[in-house]
């Protein structure tokens, strides 16, 4: 396009040059010069152009400079991104090259010729002069601040991959990614049998197993272990118990002991595994009350609740398991969201609603929802294996029975004494690592401190005698979590999807110590950059919005994994069964055909209530009667050689 005020053709430009005498000899070297490039011609300064043309040329020049700057910035970002993704071994090579090039530059700046400087440094460092000049070629046109990244090796070996038929790969994934968890060897054996009939050429079993292992771990877990195992992979929400004060919120659950106990009931002795029902303060973690019975029943729950109310007072909130015993109408009758039994308008109010306790239900089959489950884990080992219980321990699973299983049973009074001592020690143990204990104090200490403070300001509702009776009536190196891929650092928790690929491995993290809530940058041990992990902030234990957000995040995680399952499993179970059902296996060679004839027994034949006998001289008559009386299915057969004369 022509500039404003100038002709649009070559002939018009030449006429303008002659008319305005642009090529005046006295102006040579000032406003014009002969072009030295191929094709010849002349080059002019912008000052010979009219003002509109000079303005348009200046605008275009500025636009070109902006484009060049943007291009240069993108190139800088690309080379630094590539450098950051390299392992430490390749970064060390780049640092060596950068150190040598900068040494050459130092000599050049001191007045030494570049060729002599290169030869001198090459001799001292033991590298070739051609190599140094190649490094200069790599950094040509770049700012010195970008030379380190530009000198990093940027070659990569192309991954070699053996081709596998798409249909065969889909069938293998559909077979392996099943909840029955078949072994890969068995799946491969079935696929090889199918490949013979269809003429497929398959890679080796090791190659296909490596490809299968590269599938996302959340997909493998969902398909082979189910949603519960997938839920374990998703980081649990850590709740802040400090939002409460002592006795403001409690939770309850039952625990069945792995110990045989001599239980006497109605004058009769029986051997049982008793159940402990306890109420725990959420703020401190202290077990406030407990009762033992042969089973987890509503009476035991009510008595344990009554003990807590009588000793400490009435809590404001209570988290309960949604089991039949805790959701009994005698305890929670009148609560509209009980979801157990039929809620009737005329049903009596339960103890908890009558006392003004706000009832919350924990998620079924989710130990994460009840802090008391953590206490049960401690007590399961400490209270089930003391010396006084020797021979009575049953093992925590049927496959973990000790050799002295069932050799004795603990008397009830001894059992209750040990449990009482164990719970007292559990509450008084120093150095608890909970949020409120800070690794120094015990559950008893933090509970009593908060309890006294709350009582002084009237936040504790002490129980009256009537209430009690009501209850008694009928950059440092860290290890990624092997379980859910979480990184714990300075009491903060960080997670991102890529960490699931590195569970149980050590990584290097870089962070700002004054901004620990910002993203955590994660590297492999060899220095390869992996990505940024987001900080998961704690949520208040009764923060419903945080709980809903956590639920939505897990649902999105599960939905994405299921979408991945649909994309990877393109052959369903019915199609897989049909495919393998159509396989024609090779039948073994059959033996030579023989003639089948009736076997005529010569011993007495029993039929019904009568016996049919025969003699050698009456064989013909007997055979006639036998064939008439015996059903075809009752006749014995034998193989007779066809070569008989």
Image: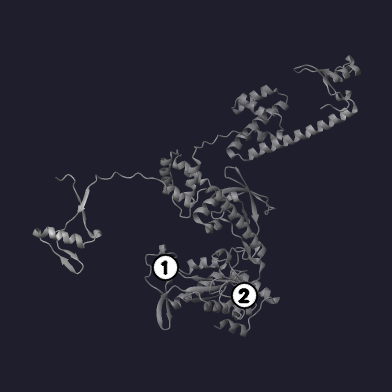
Question: At 47% from the left edge and 70% from the top edge, which residue is drawn?
Answer: 257
- The residue tagged with tag 2: helix, strand or loop? loop
Above or below residue 462? Residue 529 is: above
Q: Residue 385 location in percent, x, y?
A: 45, 68
Q: Is residue 174 left or right of residue 270?
A: right
- Neighbor class of circle 1 (other Cα within 10 Å; few <14, some 14-19, many 20+) is many
Above or below residue 571? Residue 252 is: below
Q: Residue 19 location in percent, x, y?
A: 91, 17
Cα distance between the residues tagged 2 and 1: 39 Å
Q: Quadrant of the N terminus?
A: top right
Q: Earlier in the sequence, mark 2 or mark 1?
A: 2
Q: Quadrant of the C terminus?
A: top left
- Neighbor class of circle 2 (other Cα within 10 Å; few <14, some 14-19, many 20+) is some
Q: Residue 426 location in percent, x, y?
A: 54, 69
Q: Is residue 129 left or right of residue 159?
A: right
Above or below residue 140? Residue 463 is: below
* Camera-nearest residue between 54 and 291: 54
Name the outermost residue toward the left.
617
> Which label was assigned to residue 335?
2
> Which label was assigned to residue 394?
1
* Camera-nearest residue between 567 and 106: 567
> Quarter-wise, where is residue 443 in the image?
bottom right
Question: At 89% from the left edge and 29% from the top edge, which residue is drawn?
Answer: 52
Q: Is residue 617 visible?
A: yes
């Amino acid at each position: 396009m022509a500039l404003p005020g100038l002709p649009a053709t070559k002939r018009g430009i030449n006429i303008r040059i002659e008319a305005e005498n642009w090529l005046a000899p006295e102006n040579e070297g000032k406003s014009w010069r002969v072009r030295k490039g191929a094709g010849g011609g002349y080059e002019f300064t912008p000052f010979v152009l009219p003002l509109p043309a000079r303005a348009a040329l200046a605008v275009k020049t500025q636009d070109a400079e902006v484009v060049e700057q943007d291009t240069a910035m993108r190139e800088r970002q690309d080379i630094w991104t590539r450098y950051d993704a390299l392992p430490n071994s390749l970064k060390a090579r780049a640092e060596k090259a950068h150190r040598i090039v900068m040494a050459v530059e130092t000599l050049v700046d001191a007045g030494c010729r570049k060729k002599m400087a290169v030869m001198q440094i090459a001799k001292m460092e033991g590298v070739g002069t051609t190599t140094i000049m190649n490094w200069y070629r790599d950094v040509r046109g770049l700012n010195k601040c970008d030379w380190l990244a530009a000198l990093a090796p940027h070659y990569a070996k192309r991954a070699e991959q053996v081709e596998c038929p798409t249909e065969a790969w889909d069938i293998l994934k559909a077979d392996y990614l099943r909840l029955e968890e078949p072994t890969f060897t068995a799946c491969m054996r079935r696929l090889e049998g199918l490949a013979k009939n269809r003429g497929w050429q398959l890679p080796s079993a090791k190659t296909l197993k490596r490809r299968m292992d590269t599938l996302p771990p959340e997909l493998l877990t969902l398909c082979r272990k189910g949603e519960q195992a997938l839920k374990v992979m998703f980081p649990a929400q850590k709740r802040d118990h400090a939002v409460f004060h002592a006795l403001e919120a409690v939770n309850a659950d039952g625990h069945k002991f792995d110990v045989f106990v001599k239980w006497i009931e109605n004058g009769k002795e029986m051997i049982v595994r008793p159940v402990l029902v306890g109420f725990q303060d959420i703020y401190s973690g202290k077990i406030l009350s407990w009762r033992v019975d042969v089973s987890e029943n509503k009476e035991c729950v009510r008595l344990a609740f009554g003990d807590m109310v009588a000793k400490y007072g009435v809590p404001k909130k209570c988290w309960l398991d949604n089991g039949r015993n805790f959701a009994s109408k005698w305890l929670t009758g009148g609560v509209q969201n009980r979801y157990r039994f039929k809620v009737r308008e005329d049903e009596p109010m339960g103890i908890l609603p009558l006392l003004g306790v706000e009832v919350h239900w924990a998620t079924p089959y989710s130990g994460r929802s009840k802090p008391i489950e953590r206490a049960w884990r401690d007590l399961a080992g400490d209270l089930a294996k003391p010396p006084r219980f020797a021979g009575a321990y049953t093992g925590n699973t049927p496959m973990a029975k000790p050799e002295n299983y069932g050799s004795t049973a603990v008397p009830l009074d001894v059992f209750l004494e040990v449990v009482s001592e164990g719970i007292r020690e559990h509450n008084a143990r120093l150095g608890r690592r909970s949020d409120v204990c800070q690794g120094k104090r015990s559950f008893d200490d933090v509970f009593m401190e908060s309890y006294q403070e709350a009582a002084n300001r009237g936040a504790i509702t002490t129980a009256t005698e009537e209430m009690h009776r009501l209850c008694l009536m009928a950059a440092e190196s860290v290890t990624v979590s092997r379980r859910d891929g979480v990184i714990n650092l300075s009491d903060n928790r960080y997670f991102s999807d890529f960490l699931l690929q590195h569970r149980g491995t050590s990584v290097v993290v870089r962070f700002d110590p004054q901004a620990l809530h910002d993203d955590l940058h994660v590297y492999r041990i060899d220095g390869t950059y992996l990505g940024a992990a987001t900080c998961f902030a704690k949520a208040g234990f009764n923060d419903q919005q945080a709980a809903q957000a956590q639920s939505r995040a897990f649902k999105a995680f599960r939905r994405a994994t299921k979408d991945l399952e649909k994309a990877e499993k393109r052959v369903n179970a019915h199609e897989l069964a049909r495919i393998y059902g159509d396989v024609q296996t090779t039948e073994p060679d059959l033996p030579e055909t023989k003639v089948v004839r009736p076997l005529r027994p010569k011993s007495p034949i029993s039929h019904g209530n009568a016996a049919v006998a025969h003699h050698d001289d009456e064989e013909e008559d007997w055979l006639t009667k036998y064939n008439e009386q015996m059903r075809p299915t009752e006749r014995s057969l034998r193989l007779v050689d066809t070569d008989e004369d």
